[in-house]
Image: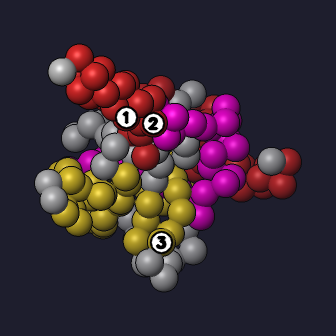
Amino acid sequence: MKIIIFCCFAFIVLKQLIIIANACTCLPATTEENYCGSDWAAHILPLKKEKINETEGFSKYVRYTVEILDIYKDKVCQQKRKKDFVYTASQSAACGAYLEIDKEYLIGGNYFNDDIKKKISLCGLAVNWNDLSEQLKEDLNNENLDKNCTKY
């Protein structure tokens, strides 16, 4: 009986260690570096959050419905005041980014599914709009960040 209890305990400990080992890790980067590494970047307002692609009770993605307040970098869509979807992993351990509803953000990321869907991650560009400096906001509006992307 003690062996069974010990084996169960060891299994639980190993499972937790595997989860920790598989956690998302990001290299330190500035907002400017994350901007330059993104296929697209926009000032957005999240309106709704929903889990999608659920299998066996687990969700693979979170889909945010967002209002695009301004677009700074995008090769596909240049419409302002448009609603769009932004996807991220459902768990922070899988580098999923968390956005609060009705709070403005500067976000950026990459495309997936044939350059149709916008994806963000914990390691990418997802900054509360109010935390950005006025200089950075001015650089975004004047397209100065794009000019400096060759440095990164």
Rendered image quadrant of residue 50 = bottom left
Residue placed under numbered mark 2 in the picture: 18
Q: What residue is shown at x 67% (from left), y 41% (from top)? A: 32
Question: Please, which residue is most extreme toward the right here?
Answer: 151
* Residue 87, position as x, y percentages in the image: 35, 59
- Secondary structure type for disc 2: helix
Rendered image quadrant of residue 33 = top right
| Crowd class of label 1 (few under 14; some 14 to 19; many from 20; radius 10 Å) | few
Q: As displayed, is residue 66 above or below residue 139?
A: below
Q: Is residue 129 visible to the viewer in this orientation of the structure?
A: no
Q: What residue is shown at x 48% (from left), y 72% (from top)? A: 112
- Secondary structure type for disc 1: helix
Q: Earlier in the sequence, mark 2 or mark 3?
A: 2
Q: Quadrant of the N terminus?
A: top left
Q: What residue is shown at x 30% (from left), y 57% (from top)? A: 61
- Secondary structure type for disc 3: strand
Q: As displayed, is residue 143 above or below residue 12?
A: below
- The numbered mark at residue 112 is 3
Q: CA distance from mark 1 to mark 3?
A: 31 Å
User: Do the residues bearing badges 2 and 1 touch, measured as CB atoms within 8 Å?
Assistant: yes
Residue placed under numbered mark 1 in the picture: 15
> Is residue 73 covered in magenta?
no
Relative to 7, 120 lies left or right: right
Q: As displayed, is residue 76 above or below residue 110?
A: below
Q: Which portion, as a residue range, is magenta? A: 20-47
Q: Amino acid at mark 2?
A: Ile
